Image (cartoon, rainbow, N blue to C red):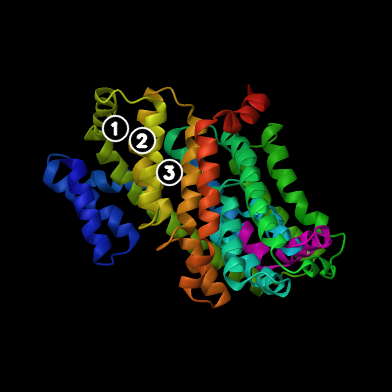
Amino acid sequence: MTLVLILLAAIALLVFGFPMFLVLMIPAALVKFFLYPSLPDLVLVQKMVGGMNHSVLLAIPFFIFAAELMGRGAIARQLTAMMAALFRRRAGGMGYSTIGAAVGFGSVSGSAPATVAALGGLTFPKLRSQGFTERFSLGLIASSAEIALLIPPSLVLIIYGWLTGTSIARLFAAGLVVGLVLAVAFALLVGVRARRLDAEIGTAKEEPHDSSVLWALGMPVIILGGIYSGFFTPTEAAAVSVIYAIAVEAVVFRSLSIPKLLTVAENAAVASAVIFILLAVGSSLAFFITIAQVPATVIDFMRYIDAGPITFLIIVNILFLVTGMFIDPGSALLILVPTMFPVAQSLGIDPVHFGIVVSLNICTGMITPPFGLDNFVAASTLRKPVAEVSIGVLPFVLVNLAVLLLVTYLPGISTFLPNLLMG
């Protein structure tokens, strides 16, 4: 009954165009007042406040702040220029450069929309000048950015770790491997497309850059090195990333003034507030899903149909892919993980492996029409129709699905590095 009420209320709110935080909050309130009236009214507020009262979540605003600093400063331009220089002699070199720049920027931002906004305007005209079609260029930019959701410091992995109690350091190690696998898969698609274009696209001129770009590359070294050496926690690494970003932009590149710093801080605060509001209402909804024993009901159903891990993971992939087509993938994370994670545990699925499968589904949802968030960000940044971006991402959605199947049924891809580093 609880799940039916939640689903009906959420669908109705989506149809009438309510903001996503209300789509999560109103069903929780309805469940409380109609199905659990004996609970104190204050329980809704307590669960929302408690949902944000976790030290690990402090990493989110810090990493968003660092991403804003680098996106509006010189680091994004320097990364793009360096990648263009590395691949300038290869046919379709700017395609590979776009993927490399997305990996580099994603390793300091953890946010796909931030990566699209920071790199889209820099890479799109260069992709077009090398002969790539407008649709393919738009699709490549939107799709490459989603690698940021896997490469540390992925905000999706931080939220998943908070929801499930899984080690964020282990998730980061797994995400690094799978993120690079996805980058290679996209590069193979670029290579196929490049062979169909004029051979002269490999003769692009080298972009100007200087050796100070190495300061930008120091960020992932500090974050990952500090975490895996035990020098600081992921949350402390996030704080260090902000200090480092301010120092590099202000002292090395001299691109940061006090007014600009204040504007960046304001934008980061707004972006962080949106995420924390969703976390708060999602935590309240998860509480009622738990006390209604929805996970236990799903576990009993899986046992009844004699479903094993393979069948369950197929169901998880279908649920996330369909949900991601219609609602914000981050909200899908908050709704589905509290229900599905206990089932995964009961079937003996490694929590790190399950987290990576979930994150890959979130990545796919970010670019899947009709409501892929990255598609809208790319259209807004580059002032192109959303329909053009949505058509352009379709080949990359197929690549995503192929990588998702590979990672789903070969768990060693996700788990070997965490096990190697941490046992």
Q: Report how far apart the C-alphas of labels 1 and 3 lie in the structure.
A: 24 Å
Q: Nearer the viewer, mark 1 or mark 3?
A: 1
The answer to whether 133 appears left or right of 167 in the picture is right
Packing grade of label 1 (10 A; few <14, some 14-19, many >=20) is some
Q: Report how far apart the C-alphas of labels 2 and 3 lie in the structure.
A: 23 Å
Secondary element at tag 3: loop
Upstream in sequence: badge 1 or badge 3:
3
The residue under label 2 is 340
Residue stretch rendered in magenta on the structure: 66-92
Secondary element at tag 2: helix
The residue under label 3 is 53
Upstream in sequence: badge 2 or badge 3:
3
Upstream in sequence: badge 2 or badge 1:
1
Q: Foreground residue, 94 or 421?
A: 94
Q: Are marks 1 and 3 in contact (CB under 8 Å)?
A: no
Residue 177, above or below 210: above
The residue under label 1 is 295
Look at the image and tell me in which quarter the N terminus lies.
top left
Q: Amino acid at mark 1?
A: Pro
Q: Are marks 2 and 3 in contact (CB under 8 Å)?
A: no
